Amino acid sequence: MDPYAIDFDACRGRQRRLLEAIEPLEVDLVLLTRRESVQWATGAFVKTPFEPIAAITTAGRVTLVLPDRQIEAPAAADELIGYEAKWHSTTRDEQRAASSAVLQSRLKAKPKRVACEFEAFAPSLCLGWNVPLVEIDAIVFELRRRKDADELRMLARANEANQAMYDHARKIVRPGANELDIYSELHAVAVRTLGEPLTYFGQDFRGNARGGPPRDRRLEAGELFILDLGVGFRGYHSDNCRTIAVGEPTDEQQRAWQAVSAVFKTFEASARAGVSCRKVFDMVQRELDRYGSGSFNHHLGHGVGLAPQEGPHLNPRWHDTLEEGNFIAVEPGVYFEELRAGIRLEQNYVVTRDGVQLTTDWPLEL
């Protein structure tokens, strides 16, 4: 039995929460057209460039449109409809129009008022209806922040690949190692660990740099190698970071590591449901400014789930609040030329009512 198979009860629970959240909008149909939202509500993982649609009535009936070759896939839906995603094995260009046409032909009654995700809405879905549309992007993003037990299992499974990659990286990161070779070996480790192809692979694989994709370049003694790794496991993501010294770290690199790693105690002491993300960010900014003004110059973190980055945002440009069930990546860092070129460390936590639970208790050392 597959422990990571779709949890139908959990999906139905998410559908009910969505309908409860949009009840004040007085709509009679909900259309989810973002792939991640469709998976969140029904469990169906659909790869790009294909365009699924989940249509949910206020009575809770779910019609799910999928590429026709995926029509037998398990999903929490009352009716599954296939659309022709390929013609004679060639992927069609007009994916959204094709799935939209199939849905419109199947709906028995014209809706009067439709809730939809404006950022991922296909204009072809409106053709022939001429009905008011209500935006629900923010509502869906807010609901997706709270992770259910089945989602936490998927995220933990993705992180098993990350842990294995960091263990392997500590064996192969050395002067003279090629960034592309390291990238290839770590990808292979992740695939072997999960036992299936990855649905995502990133992010940072460069020595003597803040980040970026690997280059055909050999690591040099004395520089730091920021490994910010993430995989996709059936649509769910991992995202955490370790920095590894190429050779023996310098005294300044060790001092920077101490400053960055100390942030996690600060975070753990202050973070819990109901706390302002911006307040936590400002606290860490002040702490790292004492190490070196301007050396910490990016967000403190973000949620992780069906997207590598989602809410809540530990970022001064947002005004989010930590909520019970959030799965977050916390990634303080400092960067300047002496460090060749910086240190970033990233831990994952689940927010609880009274605090946070660390889920990435692996070595942080350089």
Image: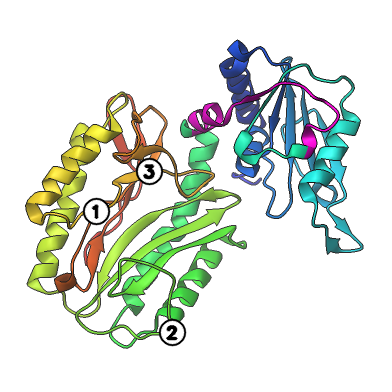
The residue tagged 1 is: 297
Amino acid under label 1? Asn
118 or 23, which lies in front? Answer: 118
In the image, which residues are magenta?
A: 124-144
Marks 2 and 3, how far apart in space? Answer: 31 Å
**Percent position of residue 338, x then y:** 14, 72
Displayed quadrant of residue 75: top right
**What mark, if any, has residue 302 been given in the picture?**
3
Marks 1 and 3, how far apart in space? Answer: 15 Å
Displayed quadrant of residue 9: top right
First in sequence: mark 2 or mark 3? Answer: 2
The residue tagged 2 is: 216
Measuring 28% from the left and 85% from the top, which residue is drawn there? Answer: 175
99 or 244, which lies in front? Answer: 99
The quarter of the rendered structure image containing the N terminus is top right
Measuring 89% from the left and 30% from the top, which residue is drawn there? Answer: 106
Measuring 59% from the left and 49% from the top, which residue is drawn there? Answer: 235
The quarter of the rendered structure image containing the C terminus is bottom left
Residue 71 visible (yes or no) = no
Measuring 28% from the left and 25% from the top, which residue is drawn there? Answer: 354
Amino acid under label 3? His
Q: Which structural element holds mark 1? A: loop
Tag 1: Cα neighbours inside 10 Å, few (<14), some, or many (≥20)?
some
